[in-house]
Amino acid sequence: MSDAALAADTVLDAQARRPLRLPTWPIGLIVPLLALALWSLSAQRGWLPPQVLPAPAEVWLTLEDLWRSGDLVSHLGISLLRVAQGFGVGAAIGLALGTAMGLSRTIEAYVRPLFVAVAQVPTIGWLPLLMLPLGIGEALKVVIIAKAALVPVTLNTLDGIRGVPPAWREVGAVFRYDRFQLLRHVILPAAVPPIFTGVRYGLTNSWKALVAVELLASAEGIGYLLVWGRQMFQMDLVIAGMVVIAAVGLLFDGALALVEQRLQRWRERGA
Amino acid sequence: MSIPRGIVLPLAILLAWQAASSAGLVDPRLLPPLQAVAAKAWALVTGDAIALKLGASLLRALAGFALGAALGLLLGFLCGMSRTADLLLRPSFQALKSIAVFAWIPLIALWFGFGEVAPVVFVALAVFPVVVLNTWEGVQAAPHRLLEVGAALRFGPWQRLRRIVLPAALPSILTGVQLGLIHAWLATVGAEYFLAKGSGLGSLLIEGRDHFDMPLVMVGVILLGSIGFLLNRAALLVGARLVPWRQAAA
């Protein structure tokens, strides 16, 4: 038998062995459903006091309550506004800083060590330092969230610009592009996918930083709901808040991952 | 003679700081003179309380790291090697992972109180996802050809793990462990803000804030950053020792 025939045979074989493909995602529901069942059972039997683990139905009621009273929308709105402001500032500075360092080795040599030193201290470490001059108002939140976004955006922008293949720059040189044209037509389009990855990390980081800063110093927002629930020993409120935080996190990440995929596809075709 | 360009900017900032504070342009409570910060640092370093505090923090970080990394390796290998386990567990893992880590604090506080358990649990929770993800990625990266060779040599599952999967996965696993160590340190400080009262570097920072003691806060932040840097360096060195083929693979 020739190689080609052999290959065709194995392909057919593989197809025959897998006649129909059931979707596999329902399998992923088994564990959560089991956990939910166990949770309900434990609540029903009173294995744990409700201050430790309230019934799932109670958490759901709390969520419904929060939604109907408008509390959820207003707290979430405040939190999202804070993220938008902080992330906007941080990403803008990060893009500028990363582009400047990416384009000029001189700027990089001057700025990078200081930047690394600042990035080295985790966002949570800057909190007490910034609380003294800024107080615990909105300025603190915006600065902390901005710092959380700044680091990944800067580093990915820098890497993205450095990663543009030299051959592409040479093509630009052949076309006698000036600096601006080179940036506009060669470097930026090529660097968009890695930069976007940085933006995605930056947004995820911003959301995490928001939760931390709202836990430590806030009188409103989604993090404050958690603090309130903890102080009142209302576990249902704490868990409801965590569900909302997870949902927003998933939404952010999912939406940006979708955009990222599209950008990557463009890159594969272009490369 | 040439000055390394990287220190120009920090030096300029220090000079401007010194000039501003000696000219009385800034509130000394917000921007204390450099010598006050240096004096505070000296007093801290030569005193004996700091060693205890740092020791307490590091112990928490390492305990939580060990717990989180062990569980993470377990789940990572399980999901990487078995398709069934992957289908069963991964969606739940992804969902739990999307809870911003600090959102666990109130839950942990209510469940574990303010003892030594709560910070360790929180640190483990912060370490776990990154170790899982990198382990999983590493295990998946085992080259198919080598797996086929293993099948041809009739390797059992143990041999397959030992001879093919592990060497291929090790670089990625080490990346996960290294990131986990950084997360552990960060989470320790966070846990000390919210959970453990009284000891550790995090509570030193909070104490400085409460007493409006800017030099203390500044020294604390510098300590925080330097220890993070040292931990990362140590992890890199150990990694280079364990997996000399990592650079080539990456």
Image: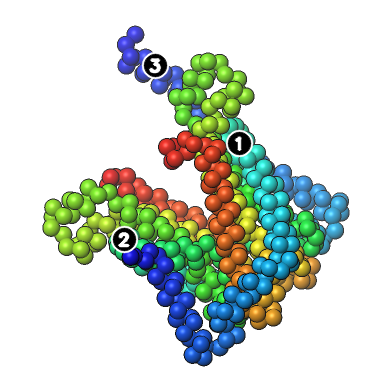
Q: Of the residues tagged 2 and 1, which is closer to the observer?
A: 2
Identify the image quadrant of the C terminus of chain A.
top left
Residue at the image position 55 percent from the left and 25 percent from the top: B163
Per the image, the residue denoted by label 3 is A9
Residue at the image position 60 percent from the left and 59 percent from the top: B227
The circle on residue A105 is: 2
Residue at the image position 62 percent from the left and 35 percent from the top: B78
Q: Residue furthest front?
A: B1
Q: Regarding mark 3 in the picture, which secondary structure is present there?
A: helix
Callouts 1 and 3 in the same chain? no
The circle on residue B77 is: 1
Q: Regarding mark 2 in the picture, which secondary structure is present there?
A: helix
Give the x, y percent position of residue B42: 63, 71
Q: Disc 2 residue type? A: Arg
The answer to whether residue A72 shows anywhere in this view is no
Identify the image quadrant of the N terminus of chain A.
top left
Give the x, y percent position of residue A54: 78, 59
Callouts 2 and 1 in the same chain? no
The answer to whether residue B248 shows anywhere in this view is yes
Relative to residue B101, is residue A89 depicted above or below?
A: below
Q: Distance from label 1 to label 3 (Cα)?
A: 34 Å
Chain hosting mark 1: B
Q: Residues within 10 Å of mark 2 (few under 14, many from 20)?
A: few
